[in-house]
Image: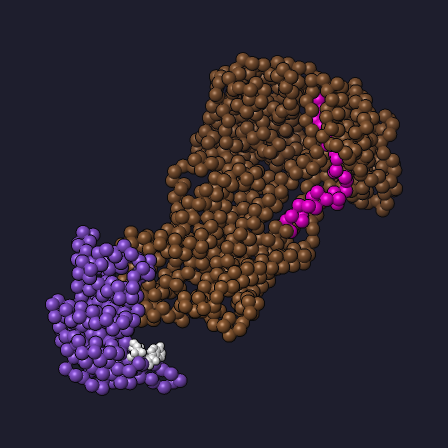
Chain colours: A purple, B brown
Amino acid sequence: MIQLEKISKWYNTNGARNFVLKDIHLDIEEGAFLSIMGPSGSGKSTLLNIIGMLDTSDEGNYRFFGESVFDLKEKKRTELYKKNIGYIFQAYHLIDELTVYENIETPLLYQDVKGSERKAMVADMLDRFNMVGKKDLFPSQLSGGQQQLVGIARALIAKPKLLLADEPTGNLNSKQGEEIMELFKKINTEDKITIIQVTHSEKNAAYGDRIIDLLDGRIQQNIQ
Amino acid sequence: MIRNYIVVAWRNIRKHLFHALLNITGLSFGLGFTLLIAAFVWSEYTVNSDIKNLSNQYIVQSNWKNPDMGLELTTIGPLVKELKIQYPSLVKNYYRWDGVTSNVSSGNKVFREGLQIGDSSFLFMYGFTLVYGNLHTALSEPFSVVISEEKAMKYFGRTNVVGEMLTIESFSNSKHGFVVTGILKNRESNSITKLNRENDNQIFIPASSATYFSRSLDSWNNPYIVGMLELQNGVKPSDLTRPMQLLLDKNAPPDIAKNMQPYLVPLKNYYLQQNNGLAGKMIITVSCIAFFILLMAMINFINISIGKASSRIKEIGVRKVMGGMRKQIIFQFLTEYVLLALLATIFSFVIFISARSYISDVLGRNIPMLSAFPAYYFIFPLLLAVLTGILSGIYPAFALSGIRTTDSVKGKLQSVQANVHLRRVLAGLQFFTATVVLAGALIISKQVALFFSKDLGYDKDYVVSVQLPRDWSDAGIRRMESYRDEFSRMTQVKAASLNWTVPDGIGDGSTMLFTDGQEQTQAAPYESVIADKNYLAVFNIPLKAGRNFDHHSDSNSVLINEHAVQSLGLTSNEAAIGKRLYYEPGSALTVIGVIGDFHFGSMKETIKPMVLSNVHLDKIYRLMCFKLRPGNIAASMQAIEKKWNTLMPGSSFEYLFMDESLQRLYKTEIQLKKASQVATILALVIVVLGIIGLVSLSIQKRMKEIGIRKILGASVTHIAFLFLKDFLPAVLISVVMAIPVSWYLMHQWLNSYAYRVSITATPFMVTIFALGLLTVMLILLQVVSNTLRNPVTDLKSE
Ligand SMILES: Nc1ncnc2c1ncn2[C@@H]1O[C@H](COP(=O)(O)OP(=O)(O)OP(=O)(O)O)[C@@H](O)[C@H]1O
Ligand SMILES: [Mg+2]
């Protein structure tokens, strides 16, 4: 599904190249559950953003379902991204002015899903995440855990094939974190959704079936 | 999707209500004012537009080789008539009229009215309608009269008055009844019934009654008849040049035929072109003012929008992550701004409705109600709103949607740093405009004050003029003089004078005079004032040499002003005494005195040589002028009216204070002054809204910084200084940059006045100081009210 070849990214500081990622090779099969670990500043988020097509690398090749991502026009890339990728953030990043319902609905609006179909899909999500009663609340009226659930529901609503999560439990307590991880496991096994998550927690990383360890922009360890 | 945008937009407006209101208020003021001005311009453009067959309608104007021989406005009565008779293939119809003023009465109601004595073609040629009466016969009989609805109400209190009588005085003091045969429907202003400001005639008398007023429309000697033509289809005005000249050569006295060049002006553009395009110039001026006010309002809108937009960066990032295309994000922002602008448009209609009568007053023109506009006109304000929305949205939409998604999600702003400069420039532009408007308004006010100042050369205070009934016989003049002396003896009256005109620019034109040793061809024009010996006392005009009129034998004596002394080539006033002036060889006038120069007409023109002749010479008069003693003016006027009515029973008592006469003379300037004041107020309001918006946004963004600084021990003054340092230089730079522009514009405007105030530093200093102080105060106010809170809350709120 995902093939990264010789991916490098750097910033120029004082004329010197400062590598954030260096020669990353990575193959990810469809259906995988990958955890990325590593110390702060090691380039985890950068790597995830590149995989998520939010960022580009300075060198190397990225194939997504065989398509060479960096060679695609923006429109094409957004299309590919919209259809296949769901994104979850550490800080939830819900839109404050939209209700729970509307937040979950937004990706469908961008994918031109018809009104009736949209309604059914959002209802299904709300039901699955046990949030029917909260659908008209605004993000500020929810707890952190609940907000992250909305974030996950929003990422899953468009039935992506790949779910990217950057420290999804970073702002939550361990109990809430565990629940999210269980949820991920379930999505991965039942719905066959590929998951890549960045985490600092060994325990959470263990939910994945594969762990890579980044250090100074290089893959240090690749545990299957 | 659009629904989603609107929902978000609406929630954003509610969430940031304060800024949304600032935004909407500023824009709706600007739009409202622009709409009012647009309505004014529209109504100015549509003067005459509902005249039938407009494209074939013309007014005949005259070019005179010697401008003192006749008026540009008028022509010779029989000329237009003969054109129709001799050239029916060119001319379809004609209408001529002569304007006179006389006393009109019904029962005990007596007023002086402008009468329009003219051809009966008037009623059907232009598509007028009568509310009552028969269009085709109303003016066919002598001693019939058609009046407007307004005059019907004035004299009879109702409009269904066909068959009623109006009594109209002739100039030989006789009275005759006129049967009302038609009531003219009130119409928007047009050049047929209202040729100009002095001729707003609403009483129409058939040409067959002209002789009753000792007038004739058919004399080739009288070049003071208004002539209008309706040409046949396809006939060009130039086709009439030769026929007109042929008719003149054949019929008119040779000196008229030689000197006069008649030409046609289409009624379509006549209104905007007349008086050197006065109406057109006013339109341009107020349109410019409106444009700049709107520009300021739009800048304000754009500025606050950009300021607010950066708080949306995160949302934009999230939307992109969820699959939003840049195009869609841009579209969302534009939708939002258009929505805001539409809200402002709705408010601007409210402003239109509530300010309409005030602005009508300022511009001296009735601005039509919203309902008077055809429905499709409302597309324009809507388009304007959409345009404003798009213009103001375009920068934030493109700039913010272009930020890299990864930065955007983190709420990183550094790539938007540039917009701080952009906003400063925009705010600077606002201050720039405000300076031009404010300094301009100050200078205009100063110039207008000059029109009413002591520099007039005479004393206008407590001077009032009253129209007299007309009897220009010798006996009539002597009777008026005895009345004048009776008025003079009243305790309320300091002096009374019998004369033709007050110094309001409406004289009896100029006279060509020459002196001993000159040929008649060397005659020079003199401004002519016809008055009695008390004129100098009433107006407090100084006598510089010689003596005033005194004896009855003074009827061939004249007074001249100092300019006349100069133009005669004399070195001293005394040298002028005894000089003789001639209208024509053999008719000598003797200069007995020299008076000080005073402004007879508008200060646009230089003071001209003037000759003040005796009412006994010309045997005409029009006004009785009084100089009142200070005190209870209303009581004095009552006393005079009472005396008036016992001396001249049945005549009207309509008076005008000199101040009002001057206000009429300087109507345009006063309009401009008021308009500039309204503009100043609007400009200041928008500037205030702008500063409040910018400063509060900046405070909001720097809340955390302020909090930290306070914890580190910074005082409120210190923090206020931070913001002053941020805003004040931009304000001052733009204000200073505006000064030369303002100076140049005002210099241009003042140049059209022969007498003008000099542009000093004061108005600019006042402007700089006022705007600077305003900025400082608004900043301090906001900083103080925002920083008095506990700093810890500010830190948390990040
Ligand atoms: N605009 C930039 N200019 C220079 N260096 C940058 C820039 N953005 C990121 N970096 C650097 O890239 C490196 C990787 O950042 P990244 O956010 O990927 O780290 P991370 O592994 O996700 O860390 P954390 O666990 O703290 O989130 C960091 O050392 C950071 O300093
Ligand atoms: Mg990170």
Residue A30: percent from left, percent from top: 13, 73
Q: Compared to A148, does B128 lie above or below? A: above
Task: Please determine whether, in this image, residue A5 is positioned above or below residue B280.
Answer: below
From the viewer's side, name the closer residue of B31 and A176: A176
Q: Is residue B244 left or right of residue B510?
A: left
Residue at 66 percent across and 15 percent down: it is: B175
Observer able to see residue A111: yes
Q: Quadrant of ligand 2?
A: bottom left
Vertical order, B453 against B706 (above or below): above
**Relative image position of residue B36 (x, y in whole percent):** 49, 42
Q: Residue at x 73, y 28 (%)?
A: B635
Image coordinates for residue B611, horizontal then vertical, percent = 78, 36
Q: Is residue B558 left or right of residue B175?
A: right
Q: Which residues are magenta?
A: B443-469
Residue at (83, 37) in percent of width and height: B516
- Image point (39%, 53%), residue name: B14
Viewer-proximal residue, B760 or B599? B760
Picture quadrant of residue B739: bottom right
How many numbered discs, if any? 0
Pick the front one: B126 or B404: B404
Residue B220 figure quarter: top right
- Can residue B167 be found in the magenta stretch? no
| Quadrant where the image shows the N terminus of chain B | bottom left
